Image (spheres, rainbow, N blue to C red):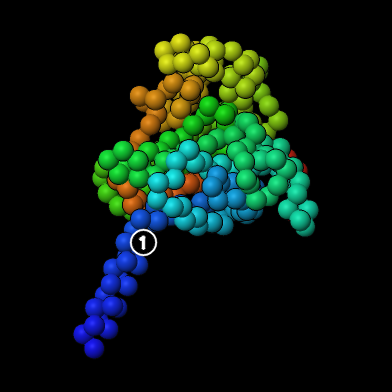
Amino acid sequence: MSNFNNFLISIILLSTLFFTSTYGATFTIRNDCSYPVWAAASPGGGRRLNQGQTWNLNVPAGTSMARIWGRTNCNFDGSGRGRCQTGDCGGVLNCQAWGQPPNTLAEYALNQYGNLDFYDISLVDGFNIPMEFSPTSGARDKCRPLFCTADINGQCPNPLRAPGGCNNPCTVFKTNEYCCTQGQGTCGPTEYSRFFKSRCPDAYSYPQDDPSSTFTCPGGTNYRVVFCPRRSPHFPLEMVGEKIVEQ
C-alpha cells in the first residue's frame, strides 16, 4: 500500500511540475465598447465580442512576441472568412497572423529574464480602439495598469488618418526617421510620436520608445485587456455612428 501511495504522490508532483512549467497567464479580454469588436490574439486566434462580453485566453509560460488587439467593422461568412476595416489578420476570424495597421496593441512576453513578464500598450502599429492592459492577480503592488483612452481617432493628424483609425507615421512614410530600421540610436521622438505620447503616456509611440513604455510583473500574474475601458473620457464617436456589419 505504501508503494502505491508513493506512486500516487510521484504522479501528483510530476503533474504539478508539468502544470507549473506550462502555465503562463490567463488573459481576460473584455469589450466595453458600444459596438462589436472582433478580438484577436497571437497566439490565441480570435472571436467576436459584443458589448460586455469576455474571452478568457490561457497562454503557456515562456510565450514571447505575443499581442492582443481589436478588429472593427468586420464581416465573416459561416466558414470564418471575410474582412475587417481595422486590424484584419489575413481575412480570417481565427487569426493566425498579426493584424494590419492601424490597430492598438497589447504586447507581452511571459516568464522572461528573472521570471518577469514584460508587457506594454503599443501605438507603433497605430490606433483604432481605446485600451486598458492591467494585471488582475499576483503582486499587483509591483506592477501597474496601463491605459490608452484618448480620442486619438478624432484628433488624428491629417496625413495619418485612415478609415476607422489613426496610422503610425512608419506605416505611412516608411522611413528610418519613423521606423528606426537602421538600428538602435538612429531615430528619436518626432512631432508625430509626441502627438501619440502626449495623449497616451503609457504607450509606445515609436519603435525605440522603450524607457518609458515597457513594464514588468512577476511571472504567474494574470491580466485583463479591455476595449473602451469605462474610465475612458473619450470614445471613438465616428465609429459609433458607422454601420456595424453583423457576422
| Residue annotated with mark 1 | 18
Which image quarter is the N terminus in? bottom left
Above or below, 107 relative to 92: above
The residue located at (48%, 23%) in the rendering is 207
Above or below 125: residue 66: below
* Residue occupying image coordinates x 76% and y 46%: 82
- Left/right of residue 160 with respect to residue 233 in the rendered view: right
Q: Quadrant of residue 218?
A: top left
Q: Residue at x 30, y 52 (%)?
A: 138
Q: Amino acid at mark 1?
A: Phe
User: Residue 160, image x and y in percent?
Assistant: 63, 20
Q: Position of residue 33 (x, y in %)?
A: 58, 47
The answer to whether residue 111 shows anywhere in this view is: yes
Q: Position of residue 162 (x, y in %)?
A: 68, 27
Residue ranking furthest to the right: 77
Q: Is residue 55 left or right of residue 35?
A: left
Determine whether, in the image, residue 171 is placed left or right of residue 147: right
Instruction: Estimate the x, y position of residue 64 in percent, counting from the top left.
Output: 45, 41
The answer to whether residue 223 is left or right of residue 93 is left
Residue 240 seen: no
> Residue 140, relative to residue 103: is it above or below?
below
Residue drawn at the location 36% of the way across and 26% of the way down: 212
Helix, strand or loop at label 1? It is: helix
